[in-house]
Image: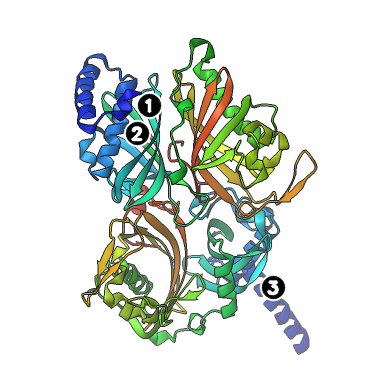
Amino acid sequence: MKYKKLPAFITGCLLITLSGFRNNQSVCDRACLTGYLDQYLEALIAHDPSRLPLAENVLYTENGQTLEPGDGIWGPANAVRDYKVYFIDTTNSEAGIFCVVEENGHPEIVSLRLKIQNNNITEIEKIVARSVSDNWYKPDSLVEKPIFTEVLRPEERRSREEMIAIANSYFEGLEQSTDALTPFAPNCTRVENGNITANNPHGESPIHRMSAGDQFTTGFSTFITSIRERRFPIVDEKLGLVYAVIFFDHAGTVTEVTMKNGITFKVPPPYDTPYTFLIGELFKIKSGKIHQIEAVLLDVPYGMHSGWVN
Amino acid sequence: MKVKFLILLSGVSTLVIACNHAGETSTNNLCDRGCLEYFVNTYIDAVIAHNPKQAQLAADVNFTENGQRLEPGDGLWNTASSWGTYKLYIADPQAGQVGFIGTIRENGVPAIMALRLKLVNKQIREIETFIVRSDSAAKMLEQIGSPHPVFLEVTVPEKRISRDSLMRTANMYFTALERNNGKGIYPFTDNCNRLENGKQTTNNPTNDGRPVDIDGMGCKEQFETGFFNFVTRIRDRRFVVVDEERSMVFAFAFFDHAGNIPEVTLTSGMKIPIGVKRPWTWEIAELFKIENGLIRQIEALYQEVPYGMGSGWSTREQAISNIPIYY
């Protein structure tokens, strides 16, 4: 992924070249799509959407709300940190990135998705997880992981449909509170807003010390009453990545959970009242199993929608 | 015979009261104050019972909670466990609408609730709820005990102003607050106060060493400082219930803070650093008591929502506009 390290002006030159290429071929390859993301981030911290090839009818949402390009994070964004995880879908011409953008010096964890059509950006979907004081929010702990840039060997790859089905089985397993549906690799790790919440030997909570698969085995998740509006807009077949955007609803109806080992715990606030997470979640799928999960999440009004589904 | 007649009259009176409560006050379907408050009470009773069938809902009822369209039975319907002790009603018989600010328990935990019901043909056609899930705010509100007496005062007819004037006066508050510069028109009485999430935020000094103690000032004095300049837009302003008899206006709105104003220069020349450095929106329910054409008392609920969110009751254009919507 050398293109990630290219200085801005080289990236710009590359984009100009690619732009011409795209005009002739109408195909935007991995480097081209990655370039759009880099160009977007540069325009963002310059507070200048006019630097981008935005389609006339571009649709832009930030945290599920339709905004005009230039509004939202465009106002206060002033730096992009080094942490970047790219996921690229050359089949659907979509590109995504997890990164940390500073707003007036405050680090915000960002998930960005772009759709490119006819050399223009037609869709911008952004999740910006902002937190003022929550110590569960750790942008400083985010690091790039080699597994997310590892190219799969042909025998490790699966079809797009299989990859989406595997990612969806994660949500299905959580919603049904079962380990019978989801193919986890041993020691599958999960990072949420910079916190290692599975397979973390230093985790404060016992459940965070378990692998993701072992967590599912406990049946802990019955208080997640619905995982809805499941979209899988980016499938990166080369790297074995699936990016999903979903909502986790907690209706507040489950106030106590008895796990499969017989241990009962009281559901803590705020999950004992109507409470929803908007989540951008990335899965590394290798040889048909989930090896690593990284997620950006924030709480939103209960029952909120993404703005991308009628 | 006379006794029998009185008994008969008594029976009619009881019947009228019963009909009142069912929204059948007259052939023109007017639901008066008692009737509207009855609908609020039976609605909240139904919510606590987790039973939408217990409420008089129209088949095509629309329901939102915190700006999200839900099915009756979801959201607070799942978790409400009992009434709280604070209750404040706003009645608009002419429009068939009623507002309510009060406390409630969710699985035993206090929360504040703003509610709007719209009645059509003796049924609830619209339900708009705003739940502030902060037990500390709810407890503060309950500690106050009861609504400010001016919210219960009937305005003598000769001092009442038109619905339109009431709403326009309330809207002046939002206009004055948006990009507040200290030079606008600030229609407050000298004894105006504001309660927000159970806390008085005027004439209530914090004495915490801040360079400017905004909460220690009166309504008008606050606005004259230009302090609220960092509120970049107040949009989706909906003036939904007008209580003409008591000169009250109940509104919903969104306060946007674009996060691009790091510092405010007050009219005194003093520069104040502003803590809101990221895009930030408050969803707000706000009740105004108007007295002699001026704002006498304000009571508000607010909660953070995703920046740019709308109410679920407006068009996209209305949701992003600061043009008032008068019901």
Task: Classify the position of the N terminus of chain B by image quarter.
Answer: bottom right
**Amino acid, disc 1:** Glu
| Label 1 – label 2 distance at C-alpha | 9 Å
Q: Could you tell me if residue A58 is visible in this image?
A: yes
Residue under numbered circle 3: B15
Nearer the observer: mark 1 or 3; the answer is: 1
Residues at marks 1 and 2 on the same chain: yes
Q: Residue furthest top?
A: A155
Q: Chain of mark 3?
A: B
Q: Splitting the image into 4 quarters, where does residue B40 fall?
A: bottom right
Pointers 1 and 3 in contact (C-beta within 8 Å): no
Residues A7 and A125: in front is A7
Residue under numbered circle 2: A123
Q: Chain of mark 1?
A: A
**Amino acid, disc 2:** Glu
Q: Which mark is residue A243?
A: none
Q: Where is A16 relative to B64, above or below?
A: above
| Label 3 – label 2 distance at C-alpha | 61 Å
Give residue B275's position: percent from left, percent from top. 36, 63
From the viewer's perspective, is B224 left or right of B71?
A: left
Secondary element under disc 2, as helix, strand or loop, is strand
Q: Where is B61 relative to A199, above or below?
A: below
Residues A150 and A43: in front is A150
Pointers 1 and 2 in contact (C-beta within 8 Å): yes
Residue under numbered circle 1: A94
| Label 1 – label 3 distance at C-alpha | 67 Å
Give residue B228's position: percent from left, percent from top. 31, 68
Residues at marks 3 and 2 on the same chain: no
Q: Where is A75 relative to B196, above or below?
A: above
